[in-house]
Image (cartoon, coloured by chain):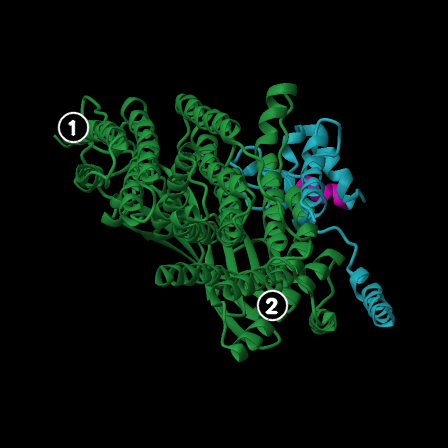
Chain colours: A cyan, B green
C-alpha cells in the first residue's frame, strides 16, 4: 500500500513539473492541418498547394494576429464555409452519436466481459 | 481480338462456377470422398481466370485502345512497368484481380483441408463460388474490362501520375489478398453454420487463412502509407482518410478474429463470436469497396467512382448481410461462457473488446458524414482530430492489457509478483522523463502513450529473458506485441518531435529557423519521357553540427493526362527524415516550400514489418505442427 502511494506521489510530482509546461502559443500549422481544402480531394489546407489553401492560410494568420483562440478560428471558418471545412466535428446534438457511441460500445463491452461472462460456479 | 478472348474466358468462368456448384451439390448427397472432378474443375477455374487476367495485361502491354479500360488508363508512351501495373490500377482490372483471389483461395482451401468433414468443405466451395459468381456478373454486366470502344482511339488517356509509382503498383494486390482472402473464412463460417460443424477443429480449417490475409492486409496498409508519405507530399503517413479507414476496418476484425480463434481452439468457447467475426471481416471488405467505388465519400483515392457500381455492390452487400444474419438467428445456440475474470481467455477477449471499439469508432467516423448529409443536408468532416481524441486515450489502457494479457494462464490465473509490474512501470516512467529531460516536454496524453508503449516493450523483452531460461518461447506473439509497442512509441515520438516550416522563398534566398538554415540555390528545367520537371536545389544546413544536405524537390508537369504534381524530396536516415516539398505561386517568382523534419520515420515502417514477421512466424509454426 505504501509502495503504491509512494509511486503515485512520484508520478504526480513529475507530471506536474513536466507535462504542463508545454507552450501555449497557437501554431498556425496545427490549424491548417485541421481545416479541409475545399477545392481538393480529401487534403487539408496544410497539405494543399491550391490558391484556396493559400488564401485560407492568410486568413488564419490574420485571425491569430487578431488574438483569436484556436476554437474561435474554427468557429469562424465553419460559419463562413460550413461545417465541412473543419476536420473536427463540433460537439452538438447532430454529432452527439458520433462522439458518444464509441464510448458506449467500450463500456458495454467491458460490462459484457467482466460482469456478464462470470464463471458460474 | 483480345476483347473477345477476354469475354470468352469470363463466360467460361461463369460456366465453371455454375458447374462447380452443381457437382458439389450432387456430391453432397453421396458418401465417400470429395469427387476428383470437383478438384479438376476448381483448378481449371483458377487457371482460366488467371489467363483472363493475363489477356488484360497483354492488352495493356500492347496498348490495345479498342478496350475502354486500356484507353482510359494507359498510354503508349508509358513505361512498361506502369503499363502492367495499370492493369489493376483501375476499377475494372482490380475487380478481375478480386475474382482471381476468390478463385485461387477457393481451390487452395479445398486442397488443404482434407482432414475436415466433406460436407463442410463442399459447402464452403459452394458459398465461395456464389461469391465468385456475384463478382463475375458484376464484372460482365457493369464493369467489364474487355468492353470495346469504337472508333478505336489512336492514343490512351494515360494513368493518373500519382498512381505511377512502384509502391502503388504492389499496394493493391497486397491489400486484395488481405481483404478478398477474407472471403474464404466468410464462406467457411457459413458452411460451418449450415453443417453444424462447430467443433474445435473448425478453427484449424480457417486459422492459417486468417493469418495469411492478416499478414497481407498489414503489408498492404504499410505500403499504402509509405506511398502516401512520399507521394502525396504532405509528410504524413496516415490521414484517417475514408479509403485508408476502409482498409483498416477489416484489419481490426481480422486481428480480433485470430485472437479469439486461439481461445476457441484451446477451450472450445465463443464459437458464435468467431463465426460473427468471420462474417464481419469480409462484409467490411465489401463495405469498404462499396464506399470507395461508389464515390459516396470524398477522398484522395476516389479515382474510380461511379454511382451505378455503388448500387450493384450495395445489393450484393445487403444480400450478404441479411443472409448471414438470418442464418445466425436460425442456428444460434446459447454458448458456453465458462470463464474466469482473471484468465487468459478473458484477456484475449479484452483484445476483441478494444478491436471492436476501434472498429466502431472508425466505421462511425467514416460513415457518419453520409448520414448527416442525407438526413440534415449538413455536410460534416470527420478527420484526424476526431480519431485522435477518441482513440488515443484508449490506446494507453490497451497497451497495458497487451503487456499483461499474454502472461496470464488458461482457466484460472494469478498474477504473481505484482511488484515487478510496478518496477516495469517505474522504468517506463523513467525513460519517459529522460526523453523529456534531454529533449523537450510534451502534452499529458503523449506522456501516457509513451509510458504505456514503453511498459509493453519492457515487459515483452522481459518475457523473452524469462522464456529463454525455460526454453519455451512464443516468438510470434512476442515479436508482434513488442513491435506494436515500438510502433506506438515511434509514432508518438515522431509526432512530438516533428518540425514543420512553411516559407515563400525566391531563388538565392536563405531562411533561418531554430538551428537550421535553408537556401534555394538553383532551379532546373528538365524534360522526361512523359513529363517535364522543375527541379529545385535546396540546401539544408544544420548550424550546430555544420552538416549540409541537398534536397531536390520537383514540380512535375505530366502530359497525359495533363496534371501538375509535386514530388517531395526526402532524405532518410535511421534517426530522422528531412522532407521537402516545393510549389510554384502563380504570378510571382516566389516558391512555396514546406520543410519537415520527421524523426524515426524508418522505425515506424520497420515496426510494422516486424509485426508481420511475428504473424508469419505463427503461420509457419502452425504449418509445422500440423
Q: Position of residue A61 (x, y in %)?
A: 70, 45
Q: Is B86 covered by the magenta stretch?
A: no
Residue designated by label 1: B8
Give the residue at x 24% y 39%. Answer: B32
Figure quadrant of the C terminus of chain B = bottom left
Figure quadrant of the N terminus of chain B = top left
Count residues near mark 1 (Cα–Cα under 10 Å), then give few for <14, some for 14-19, many for 20+: few
Give the residue at x 72% y 45%. Answer: A115
Residue designated by label 2: B457
Give the residue at x 47% y 32%. Answer: B287
Give the CA distance from mark 1 to mark 2.
Answer: 56 Å
Which type of secondary structure does the marked residue at label 2 adopt? helix
Specify the segment rendered in magenta.
A58-64
Q: Position of residue B558 (x, y in %)?
A: 35, 42
Asked if the residue at tag 2 contacts the one at tag 1, i.e. Cβ–Cβ closer than 8 Å, the answer is no
Can residue B495 be seen here?
no
Amino acid at each position: 500500500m505504501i509502495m503504491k502511494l509512494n509511486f503515485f506521489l512520484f508520478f504526480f510530482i513529475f507530471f506536474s513539473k513536466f507535462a504542463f509546461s508545454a507552450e501555449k502559443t497557437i501554431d498556425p500549422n496545427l490549424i491548417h492541418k485541421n481545416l479541409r481544402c475545399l477545392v481538393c480531394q480529401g487534403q487539408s489546407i496544410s497539405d494543399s498547394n491550391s490558391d484556396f489553401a493559400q488564401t485560407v492560410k492568410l486568413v488564419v494568420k490574420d485571425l491569430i494576429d487578431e488574438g483569436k483562440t484556436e476554437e474561435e478560428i474554427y468557429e469562424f471558418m465553419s460559419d463562413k464555409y460550413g461545417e465541412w471545412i473543419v476536420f473536427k466535428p463540433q460537439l452538438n446534438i447532430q454529432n452527439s452519436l458520433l462522439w458518444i457511441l464509441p464510448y458506449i460500445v467500450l463500456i458495454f463491452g467491458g460490462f459484457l466481459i467482466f460482469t456478464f461472462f462470470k464463471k458460474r460456479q | 481480338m483480345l476483347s473477345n478472348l477476354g469475354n470468352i474466358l469470363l463466360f467460361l468462368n461463369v460456366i465453371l462456377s455454375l458447374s462447380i456448384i452443381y457437382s458439389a451439390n450432387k456430391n453432397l448427397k453421396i458418401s465417400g470422398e470429395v469427387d476428383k472432378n470437383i478438384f479438376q474443375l476448381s483448378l481449371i477455374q483458377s487457371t482460366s481466370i488467371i489467363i483472363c487476367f493475363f489477356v488484360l495485361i497483354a492488352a495493356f502491354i500492347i496498348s490495345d485502345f479498342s478496350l475502354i479500360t486500356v484507353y482510359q488508363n494507359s498510354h503508349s508512351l508509358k513505361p512498361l512497368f506502369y503499363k502492367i501495373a495499370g492493369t489493376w490500377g483501375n476499377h475494372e482490372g482490380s475487380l478481375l484481380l478480386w475474382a482471381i483471389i476468390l478463385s485461387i483461395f477457393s481451390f487452395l482451401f479445398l486442397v488443404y483441408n482434407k482432414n475436415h468433414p466433406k460436407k463442410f468443405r463442399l459447402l464452403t466451395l459452394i458459398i465461395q463460388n456464389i461469391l465468385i459468381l456475384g463478382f463475375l456478373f458484376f464484372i460482365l454486366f457493369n464493369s467489364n474490362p474487355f468492353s470495346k470502344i469504337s472508333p478505336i482511339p489512336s492514343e490512351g488517356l494515360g494513368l493518373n501520375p500519382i498512381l505511377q509509382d512502384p509502391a502503388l503498383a504492389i499496394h493493391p494486390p497486397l491489400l486484395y489478398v488481405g481483404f478478398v482472402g477474407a472471403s474464404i473464412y466468410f464462406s467457411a463460417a457459413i458452411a460451418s453454420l449450415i453443417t453444424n460443424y462447430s467443433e474445435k477443429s473448425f478453427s484449424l480449417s480457417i486459422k492459417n487463412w486468417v493469418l495469411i490475409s492478416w499478414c497481407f492486409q498489414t503489408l498492404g496498409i504499410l505500403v499504402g502509407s509509405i506511398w502516401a508519405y512520399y507521394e502525396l507530399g504532405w509528410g504524413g503517413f496516415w490521414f484517417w482518410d475514408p479509403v485508408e479507414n476502409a482498409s483498416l476496418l477489416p484489419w481490426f476484425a481480422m486481428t480480433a478474429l485470430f485472437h479469439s480463434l486461439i481461445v476457441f481452439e484451446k477451450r472450445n468457447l465463443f464459437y458464435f463470436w468467431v463465426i460473427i467475426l468471420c462474417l464481419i471481416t469480409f462484409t467490411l471488405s465489401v463495405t469498404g469497396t462499396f464506399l470507395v467505388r461508389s464515390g459516396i465519400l470524398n477522398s484522395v483515392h476516389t479515382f474510380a467512382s461511379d454511382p451505378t457500381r455503388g448500387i450493384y455492390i450495395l445489393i450484393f452487400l445487403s444480400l450478404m448481410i441479411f443472409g448471414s444474419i438470418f442464418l445466425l438467428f436460425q442456428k444460434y445456440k446459447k454458448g458456453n461462457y465458462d470463464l474466469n475474470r482473471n484468465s487468459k481467455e478473458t484477456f484475449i477477449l479484452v483484445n476483441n473488446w478494444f478491436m471492436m471499439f476501434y472498429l466502431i469508432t472508425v466505421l462511425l467516423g467514416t460513415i457518419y458524414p453520409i448520414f448527416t448529409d442525407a438526413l440534415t443536408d449538413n455536410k460534416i468532416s470527420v478527420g484526424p482530430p476526431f480519431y485522435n481524441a477518441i482513440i488515443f486515450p484508449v490506446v494507453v489502457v490497451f497497451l497495458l492489457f497487451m503487456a499483461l494479457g499474454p502472461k496470464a494462464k488458461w482457466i484460472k490465473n494469478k498474477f504473481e509478483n505484482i511488484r515487478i509490474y510496478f518496477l516495469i512501470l517505474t522504468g517506463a516512467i523513467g525513460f519517459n522523463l529522460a526523453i523529456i529531460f534531454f529533449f523537450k516536454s510534451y502534452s499529458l496524453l503523449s506522456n501516457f502513450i509513451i509510458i504505456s508503449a514503453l511498459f509493453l516493450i519492457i515487459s515483452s523483452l522481459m518475457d523473452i529473458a524469462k522464456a529463454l531460461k525455460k526454453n519455451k518461447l512464443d516468438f510470434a506473439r512476442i515479436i508482434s506485441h513488442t513491435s506494436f509497442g515500438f510502433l506506438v512509441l515511434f509514432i508518438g515520438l515522431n509526432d512530438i518531435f516533428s518540425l514543420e516550416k512553411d516559407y515563400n522563398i525566391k531563388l538565392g534566398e536563405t531562411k533561418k529557423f531554430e538551428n537550421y538554415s535553408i537556401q534555394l540555390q538553383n532551379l532546373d528545367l528538365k524534360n522526361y519521357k512523359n513529363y517535364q520537371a522543375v527541379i529545385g536545389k535546396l540546401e539544408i544546413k544544420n548550424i550546430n553540427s555544420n552538416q549540409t544536405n541537398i534536397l531536390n524537390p520537383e514540380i512535375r508537369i505530366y502530359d497525359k493526362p495533363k496534371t501538375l504534381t509535386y514530388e517531395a524530396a526526402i532524405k532518410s536516415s535511421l534517426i530522422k527524415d528531412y522532407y521537402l516539398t516545393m510549389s510554384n505561386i502563380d504570378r510571382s517568382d516566389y516558391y512555396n516550400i514546406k520543410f519537415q523534419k520527421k524523426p524515426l520515420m524508418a522505425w515506424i515502417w520497420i515496426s510494422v514489418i516486424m509485426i508481420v514477421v511475428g504473424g508469419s512466424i505463427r503461420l509457419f509454426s502452425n504449418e509445422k505442427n500440423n
